[in-house]
């Protein structure tokens, strides 16, 4: 039997060494031609080494195993390596892709090696569906909304999680950011904030004001078709201008 | 028109009925003083009563801050008594011009009675309202106390639920598995760290009171493990003066900051990074900070449940006298610090 070339991708050096030594013992014909800390250069590696097989750790910083597999597509066989991923394992069980659990179990690794030897005879299977399932199950999609506000406080830049913010109010050149404990000024105008904040949590109630609905204590009717909002844990009263009172009309 | 409807807020059927009854009773009580019939007196009383009622209601709803509400309401009663008396004259078909001449005495008495009875009724009403307000304030204080107790309980629950990540555990064990074959002394060291970490991290093993020293031991164990796992990518230092080790510090907060520094700071940036834990005490406050030289926080990256938990637990434990501050570090990375009132501790 001819030599089989393989690449190992894992961010933990000891675990790469461990997999390599185990494989050397159980599968002498396998040559590990390259090791990677993450999937960033996977296309280059594919080009340079033309390996038949990739061992991909699912969790790696930068480009993770699932993203690397997506890039590889059907150009090589893929084996996923993971420490604990209930969802991923469920997906593997139904798919045509092999996986190895860390810490390695000698018998289990032997089974996988046996199966891989058979599979290498045929073309790599299509794994697009599995990769998409994995990607969605691993929650790889970050939220597009603003989650932190960076505000200067003295010489330092403070990071305020948006959950803490009671309201934003424009103040001529700046925008006031008010939390229970403190106030700070940022340069980003209300208009831009509106586009970037989660609209389910942050409502514009006035030309100059955005309120975090989670912190509203009560809404009262006020003068001239306006309304007034009182907040939990803060003394301020916010005016809801006529154009926005419909947000608070009874259901 | 509609926009001034709020001025009549509180003008309920109940209020109208009460005023009607009070007027009927007042007219009955003074009927022996006058030559007039009861029905004649009742008309006057109702005119004065209703006018006072409407003005009193409006006075109570006017939005202004210059005068106390009670003063305006008193003025409303005086004005209402006068206008009501005039209204009664008009309704009874008498010439209002006579009011200043032959009927002056009778009118003065009507007005006086209106003002007198009105003031008594309003005083009773204001007292009742004040009582209701006190009661409401009491209930609110009670509710706040309950909420606080609930928060403390929730904080305890969150603490119990803080789990060791299986992913971390299995990856660490995989490292140990390899080290056992290649470098047994290193394997022993790593196992020691893992045991120390688990002792502090598993809820069943956790002690109810803790101090900064113990929390630092746990953080150190966690960082030692990660230093082995991440190879040359992670470096760390703990710069805490010895006397601060015995200071009280809430459990599982420091480790959350350290975990974040590894997971969201150093690990995602592919080069190496370092983490420094510092503590200092000044002006009766203990400040513990975790600084990393990692990739920093992207504005759209989730803040994580961990930080929110810390904030809630700090609030439940210390109210406003403790805080968690996250700051950007120059030129890169994040500094997260917890400030609590300094105490001797366990």
Image: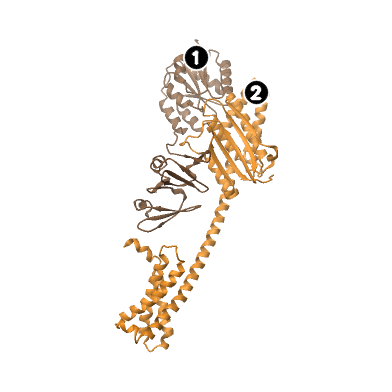
Q: Colour of chain B?
A: orange
Residue A101 image label: none
Camera-nearest residue between B172 and B315? B315
Q: Quadrant of residue B7?
A: bottom left
Q: Is residue A226 at least partly visible in the picture?
A: yes
Callout 1 secondary element: strand
Residue A114 placement (x, y as % from top left): 52, 18
Quadrant, the C terminus of chain A: bottom left
Q: Chain of mark 2?
A: B
Residue B164 placement (x, y as % from top left): 59, 36
Q: Is residue A168 above or below residue A22?
A: below
Q: Which residue is mark 2?
A: B180
Q: Is residue B275 above or below residue B154?
A: above
Residue B37 placement (x, y as % from top left): 36, 87
Side of A79 relative to A13 (left or right):
left
Residue A49 placement (x, y as % from top left): 47, 14
Q: Is residue A248 above or below residue B242?
A: below
Camera-nearest residue between A170 and A7? A170
Q: Could you classify mark 2 by the number of other residues whose Cα lies within 10 Å: few (under 14), some (14-19), or many (20 or more)?
A: some
Q: Could you classify mark 1 by the number of other residues whose Cα lies within 10 Å: few (under 14), some (14-19), or many (20 or more)?
A: some
Q: Chain of mark 1?
A: A
Callout 2 secondary element: helix
Q: Quick one: which chain is brown?
A: A
**Residue at the (58%, 16%) spot, across then down:** A25
To the question of a shared chain for discs 2 and 1, the answer is no
**Residue at the (45%, 45%) spot, across then down:** A176
Q: Which residue is mark 1?
A: A5
Camera-nearest residue between B221 and B285? B285
Q: Quadrant of residue B98?
A: bottom left
Side of B156 relative to A194 (left or right):
right
């Amino acid at each position: 039997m001819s030599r089989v070339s393989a690449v190992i991708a894992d961010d933990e050096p000891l675990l790469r060494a461990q997999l390599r030594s185990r494989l050397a013992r159980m599968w002498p014909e396998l040559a590990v031609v390259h090791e990677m800390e993450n999937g960033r250069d996977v296309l280059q590696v594919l080009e340079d080494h033309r390996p038949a097989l990739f061992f991909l750790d699912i969790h790696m910083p930068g480009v993770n195993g699932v993203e690397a597999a997506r890039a590889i597509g059907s150009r090589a066989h893929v084996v996923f390596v993971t420490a604990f991923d209930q969802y991923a394992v469920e997906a593997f069980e139904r798919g045509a892709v092999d996986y190895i659990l860390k810490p390695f179990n000698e018998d289990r690794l032997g089974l996988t090696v046996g199966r891989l030897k058979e599979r290498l005879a045929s073309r790599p299977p299509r794994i697009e569906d599995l990769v998409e399932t994995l990607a969605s199950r691993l929650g790889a999609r970050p939220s597009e909304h603003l989650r932190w506000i960076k505000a200067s406080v003295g010489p330092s830049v403070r990071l305020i999680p948006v959950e803490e913010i009671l309201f934003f109010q424009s103040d001529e050149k700046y925008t006031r950011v008010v939390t229970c404990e403190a106030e700070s000024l940022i340069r980003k105008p209300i208009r831009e904030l509106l586009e970037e904040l989660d609209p389910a949590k942050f409502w514009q109630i006035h030309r100059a004001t955005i309120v975090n609905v989670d912190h509203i204590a009560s809404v009262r009717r006020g003068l001239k078709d306006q309304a007034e909002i009182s907040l939990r844990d803060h003394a301020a009263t916010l005016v809801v201008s006529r154009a926005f009172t419909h947000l608070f009309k009874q259901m | 028109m509609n926009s001034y409807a709020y001025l009549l807020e509180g003008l309920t059927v109940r209020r109208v009925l009460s005023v009607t009854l009070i007027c009927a009773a007042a007219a009955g009580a003074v009927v022996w003083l006058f030559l007039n019939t009861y029905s004649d007196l009742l008309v006057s009383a109702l005119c004065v009563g209703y006018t006072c009622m409407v003005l009193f209601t409006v006075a109570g709803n006017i939005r202004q801050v210059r005068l106390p509400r009670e003063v305006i309401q008193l003025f409303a009663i005086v004005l209402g008594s006068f206008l009501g008396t005039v209204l009664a004259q008009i309704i009874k078909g008498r010439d209002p011009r006579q009011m200043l001449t032959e009927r002056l005495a009778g009118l003065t008495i009507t007005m006086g009675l209106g003002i007198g009875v009105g003031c008594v009724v309003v005083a009773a009403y204001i007292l009742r309202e004040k009582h209701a307000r006190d009661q409401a304030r009491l209930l609110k204080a009670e509710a706040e106390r309950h909420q606080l107790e609930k928060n403390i309980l929730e904080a305890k629950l969150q603490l119990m639920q803080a789990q060791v990540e299986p992913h971390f555990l299995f990856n660490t064990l995989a490292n140990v598995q390899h080290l056992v074959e290649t470098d047994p002394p290193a394997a022993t060291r790593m196992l020691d760290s893992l045991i120390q970490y688990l002792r502090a991290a598993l809820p069943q093993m956790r002690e109810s009171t803790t101090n900064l020293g113990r929390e630092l031991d746990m953080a150190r164990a966690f960082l030692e493990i990660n230093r082995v796992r991440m190879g040359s990518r992670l470096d760390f230092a703990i710069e805490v003066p010895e006397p601060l080790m015995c200071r009280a510090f809430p459990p599982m907060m420091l480790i959350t900051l350290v975990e974040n520094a590894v997971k969201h700071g150093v690990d995602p940036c592919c080069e190496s990074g370092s983490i420094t834990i510092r503590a200092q005490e000044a002006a009766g406050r203990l400040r513990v900070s975790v600084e990393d030289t990692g990739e920093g926080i992207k504005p759209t990256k989730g803040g994580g449940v961990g930080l929110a938990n810390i904030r809630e637990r700090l609030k439940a434990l210390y109210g406003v006298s403790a805080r968690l501050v996250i700051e950007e570090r120059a030129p890169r990375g994040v500094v997260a610090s917890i400030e609590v009132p300094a105490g001797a501790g366990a």
